[in-house]
Image: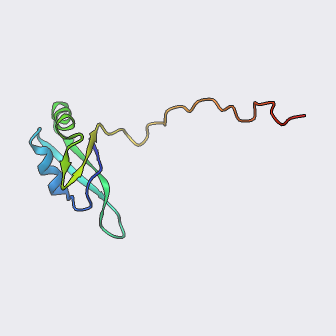
Amino acid sequence: MLNTGLSKRTTDEGLKECFEKFGEVVHARVVKDRASGWSKGFGFVRYSSLEGAAAGIEGMDGKFLDGWVIFAEYARPRDSPPPPSPPSTYGNSQYGQR
């Protein structure tokens, strides 16, 4: 699951502790800036079951963690193609043409 809106103070351990009450957490990681070591404001939690993930999302989406409102949702694989963009109308107009 993807968690956004995390405080810079949120740690891997704190993220895991917060989400453990909804199911067995296999892994929890706060993504950090390589140079500063500070949280980038998002992280991931992996549950042992889909039911745990669903309960974690329902239980924590829009709730406070370390003084910040966080958002929880199912993570999508990086390789997923972006949604198709609407067809462009640029260049199809007769405006300004002679």
Name the residue rendered at 15%, 45% in the picture. 19
Specify whether 42 is left or right of 52: right
Q: Is residue 45 above or below residue 89?
A: below
Left or right: residue 30 versus residue 23 is right
Note whether 36 is above or below 43 in the view shown: below
The residue lying furthest to the left in this view is 21
- Considering every residue shown, the one lying at the far bottom of the view is 36
Task: Return the x and y of residue 66 as percentages of the image width and height.
Answer: 18, 56
- In the picture shown, does residue 60 fall above or below 29? above
Residue 69: x percent and y percent?
24, 48
Q: Is residue 92 left or right of residue 88?
A: right
Q: How far across and down, in percent of the image, does residue 65 sit? A: 18, 51
Residue 72's x, y, as percent? Answer: 26, 41
Numbered circles on residues, count: 0
Residue situated furthest right in the rendering: 98
Quarter of the figure that contains the N terminus = top left
Residue in the foreground of this view, choosing between 87 and 76: 87
The structure residue drawn at horizontal position 48% and vertical position 36%, both measured from the top left corner, is 81
- Seen at 58% across and 30% down, the residue is 86
Q: Nearer the viewer, residue 82 or 42?
A: 42
Colouring method of the image:
rainbow
Q: Quadrant of residue 39?
A: bottom left
- Report whether 63 appears left or right of 32: left
At horizontal 49% and vertical 33% (from top left) the residue drawn is 83
Q: Quadrant of the C terminus?
A: top right
